[in-house]
Amino acid sequence: MLKRIKPDEIHLGMFIEAIDGNWKGQRFWRSRFLLASPEEADTLRASRVEWVVINTEKGTDVAFADVKARCLSAEAQLTRALKTVEQSKPLIKSIFEDARDGNSLPIDVAMQVVDDIEACMRDSSQALIQVTRLKARDEYTFLHSIAVAALMIHFGRSIKMTDATVKELALGGLLHDVGKVKIPPEILQKSGPLTDAEMITVRQHPQNSFEILSRHGNISEAVLDICLHHHERTDGKGYPDGLLGEEIRPQVRIASICDVYDALTSRRAYKKAWTSDDAVKFMLKQEGQFDRVLLRNFFYSMKF
């Protein structure tokens, strides 16, 4: 249904069919578009156009603002999630390249990515998690880092952790696999099963991550612990240190859950992406691998 409204009534998520009047003195270059940019929304509200025609079948209605002010529609959430991912990928790539070259890591850049992901997760959490599941082989590590950070933010908030702890979780999730820069690409991107020797090499990445990040005095103990121990198991059969039960701090147990969940629900060269339900069933069957209370809370939090 088409509806004619005043510019001050618009909000994100509306589908603009037409603009009646001039846009900053000239016709706007697009006549039909989804309003997903806060900057465009602010500019349109401040413009001298007389009317805006919206299509409520393709976007949100005026009444939607009364229900949840400035809420993003599903399509706009996807737009924002894609933008966050595309902005984050080159930043994460630069961090990993610095780690590979032995340079000092730009932790301020990592925190910028954390802040961007955290902001996106406030109103586009489901969209961001869905977008990060579409991983190309050569981008898997970068997108996995974004996904684990996003999942840890979501889970941390759901169990009422403090903002500071949630940021620590996110930074740990973002950097937990930085040690993989020391692993040959042909092993990381291998489409078939790994040999025993290759598996030994892959299992060195937590120690690599710890060594890379421990050179930075401004990395918290919790973040270092996430990087070093996210492959530990509560039954003591994990690696690299075989920690048992309460020896594994809660932040690390959360990281272990988010890491495996994203790996299972992502498409890889050697497997299709699992559904969330299949991942839940599989992870619940893994006796001794995860903290059972946290695992059930995580699955509950994923029921968007």
Image (tube, rainbow, N blue to C red):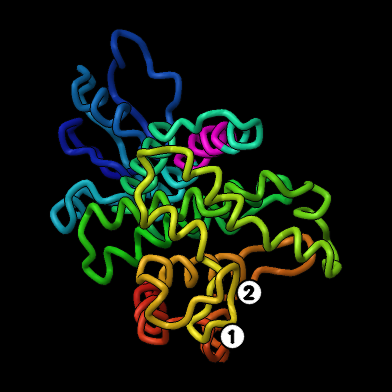
Q: Residue at x 22, y 54 (%)?
A: 163
Q: Quadrant of residue 181?
A: top right
Q: Nearer the viewer, residue 3 or 212?
A: 212
Q: Position of residue 125 (x, y in %)?
A: 38, 57
From this viewpoint, is residue 1 visible? no
Q: Residue at x 56, y 91 (%)?
A: 285
Is residue 178 inside the magenta stretch? no
Q: Nearer the viewer, residue 55 or 233?
A: 233
Disc 1 marks a residue whose amino acid type is Phe
- The number of callouts visible is 2
> Label 1 near label 2: C-beta < 8 Å?
yes
Above or below for 263 versus 174: below
Q: Quadrant of the C terminus?
A: bottom left
Above or below for 185 versus 232: above
Magenta range: 83-95
Q: Which mark is residue 282?
A: 1
105 sits left or right of 135 in the view: left
Q: Which mark is residue 274?
A: 2
Q: Main secondary structure of the magenta part?
A: helix
Badge 1 marks a residue whose secondary structure is helix
Badge 2 marks a residue whose secondary structure is loop
- Label 1 crowd bin: few (<14), some (14–19), many (20+), radius 10 Å: few
Q: Which mark is residue 5?
A: none
Q: Residue at x 43, y 38 (%)?
A: 216
185 sits left or right of 44 in the view: right
